[in-house]
Image (cartoon, helix red, strand yellow):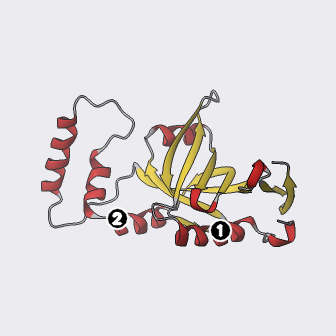
Amino acid sequence: MSLEEFDPDPLRQFQSWFDEARRAEALLPEAMALATADAAGRPSLRMVLLKGLGSGAFHFYTHYDSRKGRELEDNPRAALAFHWKSLERQVRAEGRVEKAAAAESDAYWESRPWGSRVSARVSRQSRPLGSREELEEGMRRAGEEWKGRSPARPEHWGGYLLFPDAMEFWQGRPDRLHERVEYRLEGGAWRRRLLQP
C-alpha cells in the first residue's frame, strides 16, 4: 500500500471502503463504535449505526438525553471505529460533534418504522427502569395513542454530525505487518502519512 493509492480526501476514501464493506459484510456494515467522554474525561463506548455521510461529517441519530447525548453536551468531541472482519479492515475517526438541523432529524425520523418512532417517544434512554413490564405498558399505551397516525419527533431525539479532524485506515496483513494510513486536518487541509503497524 502506498499513500498514492489513498484519496487525498479521507471521507471519499471512507466512502470507497464503505461501499466495499456493504458488498462484503452480510450483517450491518454501518455498525460503528462511538466513544464519548463526560466533562471529567471518563470515557464510555457503545455501538450505533452510521445513517449518512455528507457535508464533511458522519451522521447518526439517538436520544439527546441518553448518556451519550449528555456527554456530547458536556464534551462535544467523539471518536468512531468501524471494523469489517471479512475485509480485515478498520477505520477510525475523531472530531467535533454537533446536533443535526431539525429538518434533517425530521426527515430521518419519518423514514423510520412506525414502531421505532413510538418506542423512541416512550424510552427514557439510559435512565433506570423499574421493570420490563413498565416499559412494555408504556409502549402499549403509546401505540394506542398513535394508532393510525405518525408519531411526531420528540425534541429529545435527533441527529448528530461528527466532523472528523483525524482519521485512520487500517488494513490487516500477515505476520502483523498491518498497513496504516493516518489523515490529520492541519490548517484547513488534510495531511496523510503511513504509520508503523
Q: Position of residue 140 (x, y in %)?
A: 14, 49
Judge from the rendering whether residue 85 lies leftward or rightward of residue 122; answer left or right. Answer: right
Judge from the rendering whether residue 135 lies leftward or rightward of residue 85; answer left or right. Answer: left
Q: Position of residue 118 (x, y in %)?
A: 26, 55
Check disc 2 and give the amino acid type.
Arg
Q: Residues within 10 Å of mark 2 (few under 14, many from 20)?
A: few
Q: Residue at x 22, y 40 (%)?
A: 135
What residue is disc 2 on? 112
Q: Secondary structure at mark 1?
A: helix
Judge from the rendering whether residue 130 lies leftward or rightward of residue 1; answer left or right. Answer: left
86 is higher (above) or lower (below) than 129: below
Foreground pick, 53 / 144: 53
Q: Position of residue 163 (x, y in %)?
A: 67, 57
Q: Residue at x 46, y 61 (%)?
A: 102
Q: Can residue 118 be seen in this snapshot?
A: yes
Identify the image quadrant of residue 74: top right
What residue is disc 1 on? 17
* Gap between marks 1 and 2 measured at Cα: 26 Å
